[in-house]
Amino acid sequence: MAPPQGQMRPGRQLAVLGFIFVVLYLLVFFSGGAKGSFQDRLEPRLGLDLIGGTRVTLEARNSIGGKAPTAENLEEARQIIESRVNAFGVAEAEVVTEGNRNIVISLPGENRNLDNVGNAAELRFRKVLKGADGSGTAAVPPPATAAPPGSVTPSGGATPSAGATPTPSGSGAPKVTSSPSGGQGGMAPAPSATPTPSASASPSASAAPSASASAEPVSASIEEQRKAVEQKVGAPAWQAASGLQAPADLSADPSLADKLKPFSTLSPQEVAVLSAQMQFNVPTIGCKQLDERPPASISDPKQQVVSCEDGASKYLLDQAKVLGTDVSDADAVLDQTNAWVVSLDFTGDGQGKWTGLTRESFTNEGQACDATALGQDGKCRVAVVLDNKIVSSPEIQGVLTGNSQITGSFTQKDASTLAGQLRYGALPVTFKQQEAQNVTATLGASHLRAGLLAAGIGMLLVIIYSFFYYRLLGSVIFLSLILSALLVFGALVVLGRQIGFTLTLAGIAGMIVSLGVAADSFVIYFERLKDEIREGRSPRSAVPRAWIRARRTIISANAITLLSAVVLYVVSVGTVKGFAFALGLATVLDLVVVFLFRHPIMTMFARTRAFLSPRVSGLGRALPARNQPTQTQPRNPRAKEA
């Protein structure tokens, strides 16, 4: 076989490896997200099983046919679930999509019950009955002009104007109009039937609707929780709150403020068990408490509820006449005036419900909406409630018998956000809990120590065996493993900051398995080197020949391992993905070390005298077999005579 052409220059490969190390650790210490001391910057992002916390994996399924949801629907679902998780008050909660149907929820350092966060979104269309200040320190109910206005009008008349976030100014007030393409938006039956703002200002007009809220029957468990809240706030505060028929005017009765003050100390969970009347009328119950109530606290469409908009105003809302399942689609589009609007389409049954709701809101049937709930044009508003919050409350300006538009001072982002919220409430998506894990911080620290100990023992055993069997060549194995470990560690730190990769116990297991893959490549190379020397080649010429023959086998073995890791990552969920990712990462970096360190350093060793010594180099009997002189066979005397 012809010798390989060209002279190997190991310094170049080692220089490239050094450059990779310099760049990697510059990213570790100075890239985006690096902060704190140098020791802090060297800390990788650890998973919940190593630091404690809660992890839940939800599988999203399309309720129609059981197929995987679209990427758009899955992202909308992720956003709403993230808002639910944030309602727990956890600062570092993480909600990410995984694959084409999974959503993973991680709460580091927290053990929480997340059974309800995967429930279907509760989108409700409710008429606004009353409005009040939601700061938690209100003195008097806000005047009608201060209530966030909004409106819904047919397309046959005035220019639409609305916004997802109602503002006191008339130019930005949300309105709902019938879609110009639909051509079915009808006006109100008679303008004279529409009440003016002054006609609905009577406080007695709105007392009847809200009274029914307290008459709703409650379950025994809710009643027990209310008794617990009553004991917490005290009998005087409870009696004062129960006697309120409208939001209390604390400026007229300063002593009432002291009586109702204990309600400001209630947790969102405790506020959720109170009646709608009490939540609305007690001014010391603010929007912060209401917004953070547990998911599905106001999901019952048959009951009046209290909800907040923008964290500043709270509203008493009527029963839900239109549900999220009645919405067929919602999109952010540009109208004929080149303004962003939200196009709202309903199902067949949903359209009839929507028409009925707009009719009773436009005409203010029974004077149900009082002055604090009316929009800028004196019409009732309809609140779009997603879970526990109002995402928009446009004023109804006509009876809408076709597809509608919510119009106003929208930016593209505002319109897209509102359309996404409306679509989510109508998503045919359900969630099934695939995996749930709760780990205490103490157990997480124990897992981390055990994982590092296992990795250390595994590396130590490989090093001991390599020095015992290969001697000088064992130093190559030792240095290669150290370099691989440094590369993997730096990559974990950088990936944790850039893509949010977290090192889990399963990831540590994947790296331990990669030690075996690395050791296997050493054995292939060194045994091939021995074979070349036994065939009579010098150590210097045997090193490049052994590399050429072993290289293909090493690449094939690592490629198979990498392919297995990729397949496992694609088809698995949860912590198994961490195992697959860590195994694949360690395998790739092992190949880098093989090409840029192991082969160059072996070329350099081949030029030393120690490499020629069987006792030092670890080549065993390969060198003596080569150096042993060949015995000369005696000639046949008879042949000589012949």
Image: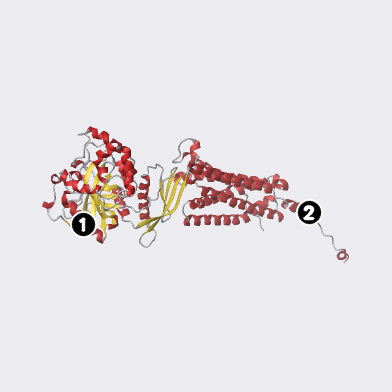
Residue 80, x across and y down, in percent: 35, 50
Taking the image as drawn, is residue 338 in sight?
A: no
Eyeballing the image, is 74 above or below 40? below
Eyeballing the image, is 612 above or below 235? below
Q: Quadrant of the N terminus?
A: bottom right
Residue drawn 49% across and 52% down?
577
| Three-letter code for the amino acid on which mark 2 is drawn | Pro
Secondary structure type for disc 1: helix
Residue 437, x across and y down, in percent: 46, 49
Q: Residue furthest left?
A: 192
Q: Residue furthest top?
A: 254
User: Left or right: 79 with respect to 301?
Assistant: right
Q: Is tag 2's residue or tag 1's residue first in the polypeptide sequence?
A: 1
Q: Which mark is residue 541?
A: none
Residue drawn 34% across and 46% down?
294
- In front: label 2 or label 1: 1
Secondary structure type for disc 2: loop
Location of residue 373 by image quarter:
top left
Q: Quadrant of the C terminus?
A: bottom right
Q: Please rate how many residues cluster around mark 2, counting C-alpha atoms within 10 Å: few if below 14, some from 14 to 19, many from 20.
A: few
Location of residue 170 by image quarter:
top left
Count of labels in the image: 2
Viewer-proximal residue, 363 or 343? 363
Q: Residue furthest bottom?
A: 642
Viewer-proximal residue, 577 or 485? 577
Circles 2, 1 touching at the beta carbon (< 8 Å): no
Viewer-proximal residue, 286 or 229? 229
| Three-letter code for the amino acid on which mark 1 is drawn | Thr
In the rendered image, which residue does mark 1 sit on? 355
In the rendered image, which residue does mark 2 sit on? 629
Taking the image as drawn, is residue 620 in sight?
A: yes
Mark 2–mark 1 Cα distance, whole angstroms, equals 105 Å
